[in-house]
Image: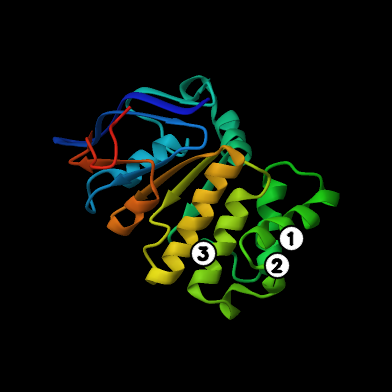
């Protein structure tokens, strides 16, 4: 099953006489159970593309379908609902609420996805357990290591079973051991739950975990050494 299909995606910013083509004609399709890395240097357009695929930014032109839903046909409220309920986001900076425990951070994500209040506690613990952090559920982010905070971020992204996972530089702030643990978790999610995972990164170590790697340079996707642009 195809989870993501992006065709002819452009993002152009114009200010006065200045025109910046951040994404230029990107085509990308990702199937259920597949892991795809978009690699490229800073400023290549990777994060802009990720924002478009995640329904956080509208393309100037082109189409993006998530599980068959054309994002261009949704109003802002419908896009917000789709992001919350059907897409899991993993951020390099973790984006955890410092005043909330690990469990509460995951519970909040579930509540935003519309889960019943009586079910969020059990699901949050289940998701934390899947990343090996059940015993740290009541710890605040300040009392956790960088690797643990990233795993909480992943637990929050995966809680509730979204089929589409987007990760922005998920290993960028981690050492080699924790980076491998994070990629093992994302790989397992794709294999066991049939999720589509797209990782945006400049970390070449990630390639070993991917089914396909595509490169981005000056806003364009090009052939990667571990696969091809679909």
| Residue 218 percent location from the top left of the image | 17, 41
Task: From the viewer's perspective, tell me whether residue 176 is left or right of residue 10.
Answer: right
Q: Tag 3 or tag 1, which sits nearer the N-term?
A: 1
Q: Tag 3 or tag 2, which sits nearer the N-term?
A: 2
Which dot marks residue 125?
Answer: 1
| Residue 73 percent location from the top left of the image | 51, 19
Q: Which residue is mark 2?
A: 134
Whether the residues at callouts 1 and 2 have beta carbons within 8 Å, the answer is: yes
Q: Residue furthest left?
A: 17
Element type at mark 1: helix
Q: Which residue is mark 3?
A: 150
| Residue 108 percent location from the top left of the image | 69, 55
Rounded to the nearest angstrom, the CA distance separating label 1 from label 3 is 16 Å
Q: Nearer the viewer, residue 174 or 114?
A: 174
Task: From the viewer's perspective, tell me whether residue 47 is left or right of residue 132.
Answer: left
Element type at mark 2: helix
Rounded to the nearest angstrom, the CA distance separating label 2 from label 3 is 14 Å
Which residue is pictured at 61% across the width and 41% down the height? Answer: 193
From this viewpoint, is residue 54 visible?
yes
Which residue is pictured at 71% across the width and 63% down the height? Answer: 104
Task: From the viewer's perspective, tell me whether residue 109 is left or right of residue 176.
Answer: right
- Figure quadrant of residue 74: top right
Compared with 50, 90 (above or below) is: below
């Amino acid at each position: 099953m195809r989870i993501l299909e992006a065709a002819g995606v452009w993002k152009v910013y114009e200010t006065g006489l200045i025109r910046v083509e951040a994404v230029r004609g990107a085509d990308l399709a990702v199937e259920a159970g597949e892991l795809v890395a978009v690699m490229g240097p800073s400023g290549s357009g990777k994060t802009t593309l990720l924002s478009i695929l995640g329904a956080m930014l509208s393309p100037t032109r082109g189409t993006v379908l998530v599980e068959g839903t054309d994002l261009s046909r949704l109003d802002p409220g419908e896009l917000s609902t789709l992001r919350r309920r059907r897409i899991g986001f993993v951020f390099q900076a973790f984006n955890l609420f410092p005043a909330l425990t690990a469990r509460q951070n995951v519970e909040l994500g579930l509540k935003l996805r519309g889960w019943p209040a009586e079910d969020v506690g059990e699901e949050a613990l289940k998701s934390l357990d899947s990343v090996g952090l059940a015993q740290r559920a009541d710890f605040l982010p300040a009392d956790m290591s960088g690797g643990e905070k990233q795993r909480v971020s992943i637990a929050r992204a995966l809680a509730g079973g979204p089929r589409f996972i987007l990760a922005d530089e998920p290993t960028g702030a981690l050492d080699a051991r924790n980076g491998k643990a994070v990629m093992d978790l994302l790989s397992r999610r794709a294999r066991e739950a049939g999720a589509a995972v797209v990782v945006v990164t400049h970390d070449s170590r990630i390639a070993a975990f991917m089914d396909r790697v595509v490169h981005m340079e000056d806003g364009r996707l090009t052939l990667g050494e571990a696969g091809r642009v679909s």
